[in-house]
Image (spheres, helix red, strand yellow):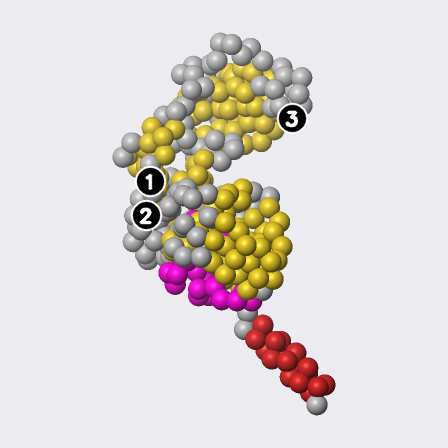
């Protein structure tokens, strides 16, 4: 009789866990909001993946889940606790809570902050947040089908999830979630100050030079850096990357025939030196 009871319990446990699915956040908002999640609001046994800013207004009880908070993402438990029963928490972003009662395992590669209050996300659901990455580019933490970036209220005409700001000002973004959708709400503005962009060739840097300027079909870049791993990007004033690659030592001939007549920015860098030069394509 005992054998049958144990077998029944095992079958019941397997059947219960067979309903587990992957619940992945697709935009910012409240944990209890169905539209925040792919495949519905998380339940026990589910694998839960946080890709955005997700807020809980009450304590969260994890029961045999796998919870993954990805980089550039945040799980904010508003004025309450995370209670972990047999779950595995992998934190690569930021998890903010009043406290953690842990009866499972936590692997922390990000910031696990115990605090009374931090950053309550109070924008409309699925509004993007602009994040400044380590290379100074700007990134929407929500993926969409079309993007509208603005600086100081003027559209940049840039349809990309990531941009490289070239002008000082206040940057914000809005997006369309799917084809045929209308644009949603703008993110909060993020102030960017550009301090290293000269209007002409940097006179302090004689290791990288460009000629002719203005250019027609080709530009020649002389690179006298000792470092062989000098990288270059040619971008528009709106931050859209047009050409990129690596420079050899000494002379480099690069075709700019594909570029429209306009002002462009050549940025070169290696492990020790960065150079920014404007040039004109005619």
Question: Which comes before the other along the chain, label 1 or label 2?
Answer: 2
In this figure, which residue is indicated by the disc labeled 2? Answer: 123
How busy is the neighbourhood of tag 2: few (under 14 within 10 Å), some, or many (20 plus)? some
Q: Position of residue 17 (x, y in %)?
A: 58, 72
In this figure, which residue is indicated by the disc labeled 1? Answer: 188
Q: Is residue 230 above or below residue 143?
A: above
Count of numbered marks: 3
Q: Is residue 48 visible?
A: no
Spatial CA span between label 1 and label 2: 8 Å
Asked which secondary structure carries label 3, the reply is: loop
Residue at 49% in and 35% down: 133
Spatial CA span between label 3 and label 2: 43 Å
Q: Is residue 218 above or below residue 17?
A: above
Q: Quadrant of residue 129?
A: top left
Between 36 and 275, the residue placed more toward the observer is: 36
Asked which secondary structure carries label 2, the reply is: loop
Question: Does the stretch in magenta take in 76?
Answer: no
Q: Are the residues flagged by discs 1 and 2 in contact, CB closer than 8 Å?
A: yes
The N terminus, quarter of image: bottom right
Q: Which residues are magenta?
A: 31-53
Is 210 situated left or right of 118 in this image? right
How busy is the neighbourhood of tag 1: few (under 14 within 10 Å), some, or many (20 plus)? some
Residue at 66% in and 85% down: 5
Q: Quadrant of residue 33?
A: bottom left
Is 4 situated left or right of 21 in this image? right
How busy is the neighbourhood of tag 3: few (under 14 within 10 Å), some, or many (20 plus)? some
Label ID, residue 229: 3
Between 86 and 17, the residue placed more toward the observer is: 86
Q: Position of residue 93 (x, y in %)?
A: 52, 45
Closest to the camera, between mark 3 and mark 1, is: 1
Q: Position of residue 171 (x, y in %)?
A: 35, 34
């Amino acid at each position: 009789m005992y054998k049958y009871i144990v077998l029944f319990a095992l079958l019941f446990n397997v059947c219960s866990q067979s309903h587990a699915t992957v619940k992945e956040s697709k935009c910012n908002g409240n944990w209890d909001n169905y539209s925040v999640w792919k495949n519905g609001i998380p339940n026990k046994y589910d694998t839960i993946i946080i890709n955005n800013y997700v807020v809980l207004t009450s304590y969260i009880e994890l029961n045999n889940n796998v919870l993954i908070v990805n980089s550039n993402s945040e799980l904010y438990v508003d004025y309450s606790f995370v209670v972990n029963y047999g779950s595995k928490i992998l934190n690569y972003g930021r998890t903010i809570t009043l406290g953690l009662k842990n009866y499972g395992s936590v692997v922390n590669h990000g910031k696990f902050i115990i605090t009374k209050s931090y950053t309550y996300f109070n924008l409309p659901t699925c509004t993007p947040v602009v994040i400044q990455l380590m290379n100074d580019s700007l990134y929407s933490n929500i993926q969409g089908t079309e993007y509208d970036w603005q600086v100081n209220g003027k559209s940049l005409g840039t349809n990309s999830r990531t941009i490289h700001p070239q002008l000082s000002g206040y940057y914000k973004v809005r997006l369309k979630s799917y084809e045929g959708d209308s644009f949603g709400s703008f993110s909060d503005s993020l102030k960017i100050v550009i301090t290293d962009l000269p209007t002409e060739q940097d006179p302090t840097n004689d290791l990288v030079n460009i000629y002719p300027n203005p250019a027609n079909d080709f530009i020649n870049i002389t690179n006298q850096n000792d470092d062989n791993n000098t990288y270059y990007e040619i971008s528009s004033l709106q931050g859209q990357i047009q050409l990129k690659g690596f420079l050899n030592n000494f002379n480099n001939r690069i075709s700019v025939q594909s570029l429209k007549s306009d002002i462009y920015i050549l940025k070169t860098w290696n492990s020790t030196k960065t150079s920014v030069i404007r040039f004109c394509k005619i």
